Image: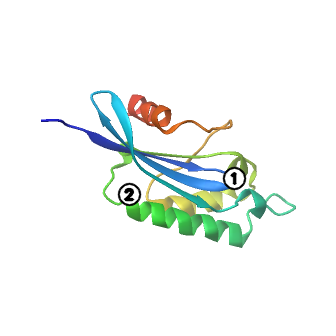
Amino acid sequence: MSSFRLLAAIDLGSNSFRLEIGRESQGQFSRVEYLKETVRQGGGLDAERHLTPQAMQAGLDCLARFGERLADFKPRQVRAVATQTLREARNRDEFLAKARQALGFPIEVISGPYSPDTLTFLNEITKANT
């Protein structure tokens, strides 16, 4: 009998939010599902570097849809990261509090650019959660 576990990675990028779900079995990964939504949060920063209400709402709506897909996942199965736009946004904390509620999982703002392939990201999740 083969045992496996599902892992999910969410990347909150400046242009798109991505959800990748992979299956891990005996140290091998395979992609199960990939969702991508264009939210253009980077274009939603105003002159004072605040996310506009429209940019926030677009992101929150997307995360709510991702959260519905991840309803049966446990926190140790999910890693969500945010990059450039949320590093720069002065109202990042306000957005992240609402985003965590919409998604159902914490979101980490990471310090550098991040565009890994799915399997590498899922491998990092496994290492971080074992």
Dot 1 falls on a residue whose secondary structure is: loop
Report crowding for label 1: few under 14, some 14 to 19, many 20 or more residues within 10 A (C-alpha): some
Position in image of residue 92 (x %, y %): 67, 56
On residue 14, the disc is 1
Which sits in the foreground, 78 or 15?
A: 15
Residue at the (70%, 72%) spot, across then down: 54
Task: Give left or right: position of 16 versus 129.
Answer: right
Report crowding for label 2: few under 14, some 14 to 19, many 20 or more residues within 10 A (C-alpha): many
Residue at the (70%, 61%) spot, across then down: 40
View extreme (right): residue: 47
Residue at the (39%, 61%) spot, across then down: 69
Task: Give left or right: position of 113 versus 12.
Answer: right
Res 25 → quadrant: top left
Task: Give left or right: position of 54 versus 3.
Answer: right
Which sits in the foreground, 5 or 94?
A: 5
Labels 2 & 1 near each other (Cβ < 8 A) = no
Among numbered discs 2 and 1, the one appearing first in the sequence: 1
Disc 1 marks a residue whose amino acid type is: Ser
> Residue 61, can we see it?
yes
Dot 2 falls on a residue whose secondary structure is: loop
Position in image of residue 107 (x %, y %): 53, 49
View extreme (left): residue: 1
Q: For the N terminus, which image quadrant?
A: top left
Q: For the C terminus, which image quadrant?
A: top left
On residue 48, the disc is none
Position in image of residue 64 (x %, y %): 48, 66
Task: Give left or right: position of 122 versus 60.
Answer: left
> Residue 101, can we see it?
no
Disc 2 marks a residue whose amino acid type is: Leu
On residue 70, the disc is 2
Q: CA distance from mark 2 to mark 1?
A: 22 Å
